[in-house]
Image: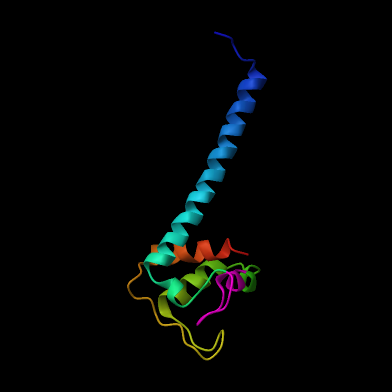
Amino acid sequence: MKSMSYGAVAAAVTLSAMLGAGSQAAHAEAAGLALAQQQNCMSCHSVTRPFMGPALREVAVKYAGREDAANYLKHKILDGSTGVWGRVPMPANTQLTPDQAATLAAWVLTLK
């Protein structure tokens, strides 16, 4: 069995950590999309085009600069809103837990 130098081991550990972080991000994105589909968000929203509600990518771009964007969107998802994106109101999503709403908000913000 061939031994690896300390530098090679360190590089392998760093690469492994980077790949793990990438897969965690991909998993979070997939979980957000799956939750949006399960909770019927996609009945009114699309990722890329306006439908009954705004395109989720537009939402991400609009709020990307806000320090409290994730929390703001979480509350909009839970409580609903009127007049922010036009005349069609977004109903409150009372079937969601706060953690689910936070997951959706975080996912939407990745779409920018």
Residue 58, picture quadrant:
bottom right
Q: Residue at x 58, y 29 (%)?
A: 13
Instruction: Name the image colouring.
Output: rainbow
Q: Residue at x 41, y 62 (%)?
A: 35
Position of residue 37 measured from the top left corner of the image (x, y, whole percent): 41, 66
Query: Would you say the magenta stretch is mainly helix, strand or loop?
Result: loop
Position of residue 54 measured from the top left corner of the image (x, y, whole percent): 55, 78
Position of residue 78 measured from the top left corner of the image (x, y, whole percent): 41, 75
Q: Residue at x 47, y 70 (%)?
A: 74
Q: Is residue 74 magenta?
A: no
Q: Nearer the viewer, residue 93 or 46?
A: 46
Residue 48, picture quadrant:
bottom right
Position of residue 27 measured from the top left corner of the image (x, y, whole percent): 48, 50
Q: Quadrant of the C terminus?
A: bottom right
Tell whether 77 sits left or right of 56.
left
Whether 86 is drawn above or below 58: the answer is below
Q: Residue at x 59, y 38 (%)?
A: 18
As drawn, which residue projects farthest toward the top?
1
Picture mark count: 0
Tell whether 7 sits left or right of 110.
right
Q: Quadrant of the N terminus?
A: top right
As drawn, which residue projects farthest toward the left?
95
Q: Is residue 49 magenta?
A: yes
Q: Nearer the viewer, residue 111 or 17?
A: 111
Residue 11, picture quadrant:
top right
Q: Give the extent of the magenta segment.
A: 48-60
